Amino acid sequence: MEIIEDQYQKVIEAFPNTIIVKNFISHLKIPLMNNVFLDIDYSKYPRRPKVILIKADGQVFKKVDNMISSLMGWKKKKAPSIVELITEILAFIEGMRSNKITVKADLINGILALCRDHHPREILGLLRVDKGIITEFILPPGAITSNKSGVYYPRRMPSDPSLEGTVHSHPSGNPNPSPTDLKSIFIKGRFHIIVGFPYDNLNCVKCFDRKGKGINLQIID
């Protein structure tokens, strides 16, 4: 029980508006917006908590199990704290509300440099998200690129829910998704970054959802 109490104390310190459900400190609600609450039951922690978004009347608003990296890849022996989990969920929700993806400046600058080095061939990679922030570029095994396209084989990739997006370059200079992109690379993944020639500034970089709708890209240090 000590581990539950410890997690609870840290949660109420970080999120003072937390509500206890039915007098159980292992079952909490955090108000979000428009009478929607984050409902989290961690009574079996460090096993994976039960997390849903609910309405004020208790009805399920949205399930987030298959949207949050920590939940999808949860491991009992390496379980994040409940505060870390809540922080990641809130960052994800805020990103969805504001139509925004956050990436580290060093990473995006490294991707720009990689595009310049490989021009006129395309680059193609997967992007790892940690606590709501894009933190790492992963080269897919067996990826094939040319000056017109890039292809990789998802079946060759290990199961890793933190790989939420992709990035590839357009040597043509047009950083918008092509019909081929929408039918191939964009099918899987929550977001997709395209970098257009000459790869020398952030105006060359655009981000999209899987349907090709633009997403704001926030750069942080």
Image (spheres, grey):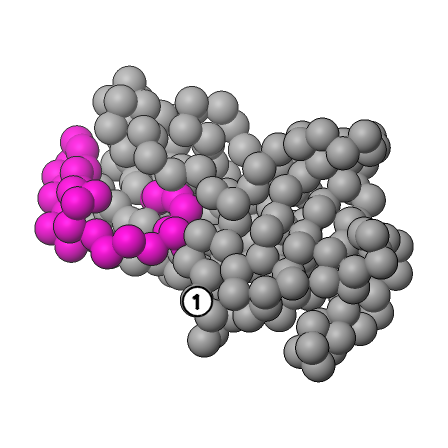
Magenta span contains residue 140: yes
Residue 98 or residue 175, whichever sits in front = 98
Magenta-drawn segment = 139-167
Identity of the residue furthest to the right in this view: 17
Q: Residues within 10 Å of mark 1 (few under 14, many from 20)?
A: few
Q: Residue at x 13, y 39 (%)?
A: 146
Task: Name the kind of residue labelled 1 in the image.
Answer: Lys
- Residue at numbered disc 1: 75
Q: Residue at x 17, y 31 (%)?
A: 148
Left or right, 206 with respect to 163, comes to right
Q: Residue at x 30, y 41 (%)?
A: 168
Left or right, 170 with respect to 12, comes to left
Percent of width and height locating residue 5: 75, 75
Left or right, 65 with respect to 39, comes to left
Residue 73 or residue 208, whichever sits in front = 73
Left or right, 60 with respect to 157, comes to right
